[in-house]
Amino acid sequence: MPSLLPGPVHVSASARLGVFSLAELTAAGVTEREVRSAVRAGDWVRLRRGWFIDAGALAVAEETGRRHEVDALAVTGALARPTAVLSHATAARIWGLPVPAGLSTDVRLTDPGRWRTGPGYVIAHADLPAEEVTTHGQHRLTTVSRTLVDNARESRELPAVAAMDAALLRGLVTEEELQATLGRHRFAPRNPRAVRAVAAADGRAETWLETRGRLRFRAAGLPPFVPQVELWVGERLLKVADGWYDDAAVAVEFDGRVKYVRPAYGGRPEDVLFDEKRTEDALRALGVRFVRLVDEDLGPGWAPVEHRVRRELLVPGPAVRPFRAVPRSVGRRRAVG
């Protein structure tokens, strides 16, 4: 925060990602002329009437993916409605959950007393049980389970389930909490969508692509695979298969490009590819077969993929298995670069 912010305002703004109010400035003796001058000079940015942010703090928020939080702080401060809490996609963003690309950046809130729309925000009118409201940093918002269920009512299946998978994987929510939230809102509009999303969620999925693949297999009527299965030879763990069909000894792998280009996933792309080939060759020699899929395979190019999977599943795996397949009970978050 620059030195031109009075000390008391500097302290309060520092706790709010750099956001401060005209009322705070006035209380600290800052005149309207000084405010206009700071905005014209580009030192402060007006977020909405009566609410500002230091330009440097705004740049940091945008670089770190927290711009939506800045807007949420300004909206809640301007509305000054103690009964309204951040919800839906806004709450999802604050919790760090995935949201669909291209989704509106309007700040979403829920208020048990009223609905309202305004510039840059939408307030939904709905019940807010005390157990579904919490705080996270400077924000008052819906719990993770309520956030997921609210969004599932408005979203397509894939983004709804992917968000639930991510929250379950990170330990932000439990299946019991999701079921309890569904129960409290069983008569809410479009609740069947949320019921289906919760039923389809699986916290063992470690990537969005794995979620998409699991849902694509299910939609095609294919037998469900077991997610995240460790393949051991003796005391050595050779591989963790994204999906596993035990009877056929078929491993399903969902490959995203990031796996081969980020250092966190094994260094140089050629090293990652070489290690993958050596591992697969070793397992193939023991009777394991592989089906590797990329994002494009799950879209328009699906028909030959489905045919191949069905063909592979018709062939039983080896009767004698020098390897062990050990399913993981929970998923494990992957490192990111």
Image (cartoon, grey):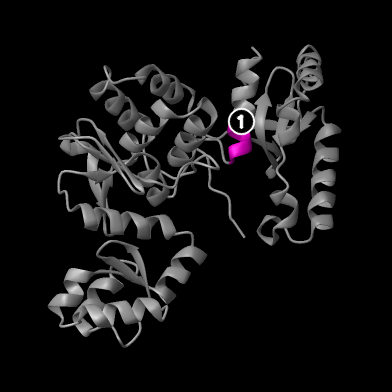
Q: Position of residue 316 (x, y in %)?
A: 78, 14
Relative placement, left or right, of 23 versus 279 is: left
Q: Residue at x 70, y 43 (%)?
A: 256
Give whichever of 71, 333 is nearer the camera. Answer: 71
The residue identified by callout 1 is 212
Horizontal side of residue 37 vs 281, given as left or right: left
Q: Residue at x 16, y 48 (%)?
A: 81
Neighbourhood count class around disc 1 (C-alpha, 10 Å): few under 14, some 14–19, many 20 upward = many
Q: Nearer the viewer, residue 189 or 192?
A: 189
Residue 43 in sight = no
Start-end of magenta stretch:
207-211
- Quarter containing the C terminus: bottom right
- In the image, residue 261 above or below residue 90: below
Label 1 element class:
helix
The residue located at (74%, 61%) in the rendering is 267
The quarter of the picture where residue 28 lies is bottom left
Question: At which x and y percent is residue 14?
Answer: 30, 73
Percent position of residue 265, x then y? 68, 55
